[in-house]
Image (tube, rainbow, N blue to C red):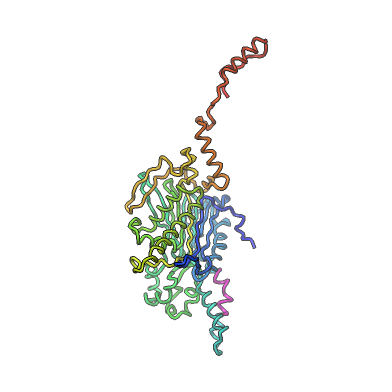
Amino acid sequence: MEAWTDDIPICRSAGIGTVNNEIYRKDGRRVEMHPMRCRYFHFRQDDFQLCTYGLFDGFCGSQVSDFAMKRLPAELLLGQLSHNSSDDAVRDVLRQAFVNVDREYIESTMEAIKARIVLREDHRESSEDRDRKLRELDLQARIGCSATAAVIVNKKLFVANVGDTRAVLCSQLPSGELRVTKLSVDHVLGNEDEDLRLSQLGLSAEQADRALNIPGYTRCLGYHDAKGGYTDVDALRSSRDEPVLAEPEISCVAIDPSFQFVVIYSRSVADCLSQVCSFSDGCGGDISHELCRIALEQFSENTTVTGVAQSVVDKIVRLHREQFEMESTTTTTPARGVDCTEREDMCLLVRNFNAKLASHRRKRSGIAAVAPTDTTNTSNASGGVMSMMHRQPEDTITSKSTTTEGSESTQGAQAAQNERKLPLLSNGRIQPYVDFSHFNREWAKAQAAAGGGAAVNGTNKH
């Protein structure tokens, strides 16, 4: 059955990169731990002048992330928001969207929740079939997902999140310095605000850690056992209210020409990058900064935003895999105790604002080389390399996509070659390169000698 969102145009200023989880084996065989649990969307609704994006990182299963991917757009794209919406109205819609999706999912599982209660109350002699069903129902009550949604409306960017699916904004100052702004909050154990909230509910740190340590979220979608079913969990029973929330934290920034791109990514992207960086002094310990640096590099090498996003993920996976292979060739303990024997699903969404893709750089410079000749590089405090990006007019809702796809890429390369051979006038037309003045003069003489029509202007050029 087709989803209702099939008719909504996707935002081509955004792209997705994904790779499935993997257990690394020394024999090189690929082994996955489970099916892909990440989901995403990126839509553009011109009728309401808004763009919206979402990324969902599931745990214990993909049911909640799949449900949220299909349902959350309905809470944002059916007229709830428009260019006339105030900031407070946008925040309210985002907040209510998360709460509604969470409630609707849990309501959709009520039959399974009731069946679990019946099985638990069944005091007859235990059977393998009963125990198996109870384990399946227990697992279903723990399924959930971390979620981040972003909305661009009225020249502002709003980001809402629960869990630890992160969002960062990459901007570039006139000096060329890279500025990274975190737009999300990790709702996990260890977050001081979240730990304080749990303590105010009557939960000690030990109780919270024992009950919530896996997956460790204090806010998420789904996860019935830590919400409506928390009274059935021994370590959570003393809580005065639901310990895990679905209400997101929301940030808002006004879009300006310094914006290069926004990256929304799953926790496993940060985990793998942090493990790789622990062996390198180039990261400086700032994972968000290093991720944006890698993305900037990929913009100069790819012709589509999807290509950028996938290249970023592929590069991190390659570095992580290489680290495993390097460690597996030694018999010593891995440096700093980092274990690179596996990685989880990785998903990364890039929304471009003003970063130049490789095709645009080629057209602007008129050469086929990837790197533009007028790009300058400077070193940042972390030791990474940053590119001074060209500025272009702000592109949020009304301008066309910067993505070049399929045959357009070939046409763009051909156009670059033509521009290299044929100089252009200021109006964009090809400069005249054949002089017909001699022909016109001789033609005029012949016509005059024959008593023909009016002479042709001998200075015309075509």
Residue 417: x and y in percent read 52, 37
Residue 425: x and y in percent read 51, 29
Magenta-colored span: 104-115
Residue at image point 47% right, 79% down = 231
Q: Is residue 163 visible?
A: yes
Determine which quarter of the picture holds residue 73. bottom right
Q: Main secondary structure of the magenta part?
A: helix
Q: How many marks?
A: 0
Above or below — where is 291 with respect to 235? above
Looking at the rendered image, the quarter that the C terminus falls into is top right
Residue at the extreme bottom of the image, as rendered: 125
Residue 285: x and y in percent read 34, 59
Q: Nearer the viewer, residue 224 or 438?
A: 438
Looking at the rendered image, the quarter that the N terminus falls into is bottom right
Q: Is residue 421 magenta?
A: no
Q: Nearer the viewer, residue 12 or 94?
A: 12
Q: Nearer the viewer, residue 286 or 102?
A: 286
Q: Is residue 110 magenta?
A: yes
Residue 432: x and y in percent read 54, 26
Determine which quarter of the picture holds residue 249. bottom left
Above or below — where is 115 with respect to 247? below
Q: Is residue 185 visible?
A: no
